[in-house]
Amino acid sequence: MLLRKDQLELSLREEKQLIETGKLKEDNPLDLSDGFNRLCEACRRGDLKLCQETITEGVNINARDRFDYTPLIL
């Protein structure tokens, strides 16, 4: 089903309000922690060993950086 632009904007606005009120969890939260930054840098360089180490430490692989990138995109 395709939505018109105004319908999509309304849906996104409603979703944002639900996230802000805590009724809905954001799938890709902003993460500015050192561990997540190390994971992003490792992904950019293709350093598989460091990627595995940071993931093992419990870094959220679904988070996003300040540029809205997730490790998968990098």
Image (cartoon, rainbow, N blue to C red):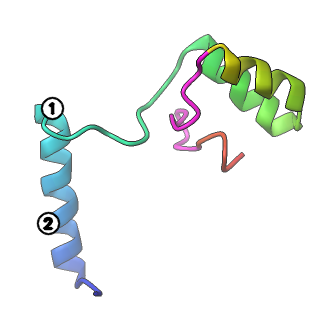
* 62 relative position to 71: left or right: left
- Is residue 62 one of those drawn in magenta? yes
- Choose top left, top right, bottom left or bottom right for residue 28: top left
How would you rate the neighbour count of disc 1 (Cα within 10 Å): few for under 14, some for 14-19, many for 20 or more? few
* 51 relative position to 58: left or right: right
Between 24 and 41, the residue placed more toward the observer is 24
Q: Secondary structure at mark 2?
A: helix
Q: Residue 9 in the image: x percent, y percent?
A: 21, 67
- Choose top left, top right, bottom left or bottom right for residue 49: top right
Which residue is at 78% across, 36% downward?
43
Residue furthest out toward the front: 56
Q: Residue 74 in the image: x percent, y percent?
A: 72, 45
Which residue is at 41% across, 33% downward?
29
Q: Which amino acid type is shown beneath numbered disc 2?
A: Leu
Closest to the camera, between mark 2 and mark 1, is: 1
Between the residue at mark 2 and the residue at mark 1, the CA separation in whole angstroms equals: 19 Å
Name the residue beneath numbered marker 1. 22
Name the residue beneath numbered marker 2. 10
- Is residue 64 one of those drawn in magenta? yes
Residue segment shown in magenta: 58-69
